[in-house]
Amino acid sequence: MRVNADDYKDLGNFDIPNVTRNTFMPVFITGENRPGQEYGKLQIGDLSKQLFQNNLTKVYFIPLFIKQIWSKTITEKNDKKEDYDKLVDFSWDNKVKPKPINDPDCKYSYIVAGLFIDENTKKKVPHPYIEDKYAVIYFNCKGTKVGSILDFNKLLDTTINEYMSRSDYKALTADDKGSFDYDREKILCGYRRLICSADVAYADTNFGKKHIFKFSVIKEKTPDGKGERSKVLDSEDSKTILDLCKNIQKDFTKQFDRTPMINKNLSQPVVTTVSNIEFADNVNKNDSSIHATTKPVKNPEPKVTSPASSSDDAFDLDLSL
């Protein structure tokens, strides 16, 4: 199966139409024991509703979008004299609006959004909150979690270059003669042909060990059965993922692009994100490098699991949408 790359040329251009808000559900790590949540485990869903998934040790997903942004917030008082974070600057595209060099309060972060894959069935599942949509999730990599996405980006780049160099690789954008533009194929398909996972690790900071995401790429046996290599979606499933990206891209932009808040000079508090859900009880507002709790962690350290290697038939995905 082949696709016309021009049909998906807008996947890199994010506009802001009137579409559904909060289609993508947050994945976050519980920083302390709460009802229904275990310390150091992964949770998925809206805290104002029943969680979609709770107390997971690993989350499987197919990456749809990975987006770098930067923002600046300041602490102000509301009518009740309570502190809140006010968004005062934001950039959805660093090339259009570069991050100020000399402002330490402007911070990079990354949104990793993907199609959720059930750990047991190895298939997509319906969205719990929105009819006629499949469950899609996101990881908000900011503060101490920026290192997670930087490592993930390196892993993805190495993995993509490896699988695209295979003798049996079938490019989705190839013409009838089998030739294709390498860079265009990599940008368009790249990580969208991989199955990935995230589990919990931790990073050392000035305030102790803090939870971070640890991303991995799912493996399969090599054709000779003697080794392992990254599992790559076949052409049919890959086209399905591209179609999903094309259909859901506007939802992604609407949910995460805060440019309208800046343009309209809104003074309302910033919408709660995964980062401050985890440490909502005591964020050190004065620290410019991380957003993490300053109280000693009394709970046991999270167990760090090794990246999973799954056989080919374990991920026999049913991706028809």
Image (cartoon, rainbow, N blue to C red):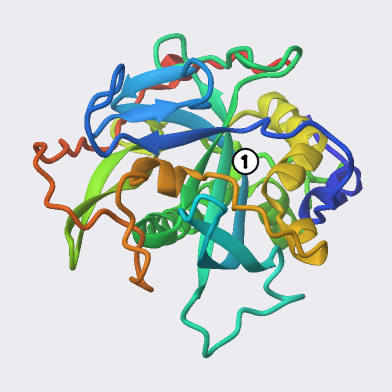
Q: Is residue 188 above or below residue 168?
A: below
Picture coordinates of residue 21, whole percent (x, y): 73, 34
Residue at the outermost front position? 80
- Report the side of 121 relative to 79 (left or right): left
How many numbered markers are drawn?
1
Q: Position of residue 254 (x, y in %)?
A: 76, 44
Which part of the image, by quadrant, shows the N terminus?
top right
At a point 31% along the width and 62% down the height, the residue shown is 284
Displayed quadrant of residue 70 = bottom right
The furthest residue to the top: 121
The one of 125 and 183 positioned closer to us in this rendering? 125
Position of residue 67 relative to residue 103, above or below, is above
Quadrant of res 96: bottom right
Give the residue drawn at x 77%, y 55%. Answer: 12
Residue 313 is at least partly visible in this image:
yes
Q: Say whether residue 215 is left or right of residue 167.
A: left
Q: Quadrant of the C terminus?
A: top right
Q: Is residue 149 left or right of residue 172?
A: left
Horizontal and vertical percent for residue 285?
A: 37, 64
Q: Which residue is mark 1?
A: 192
Q: Residue at x 33, y 55 (%)?
A: 283
| Secondary structure type for disc 1 | helix
Kind of residue sitting beneath label 1: Arg
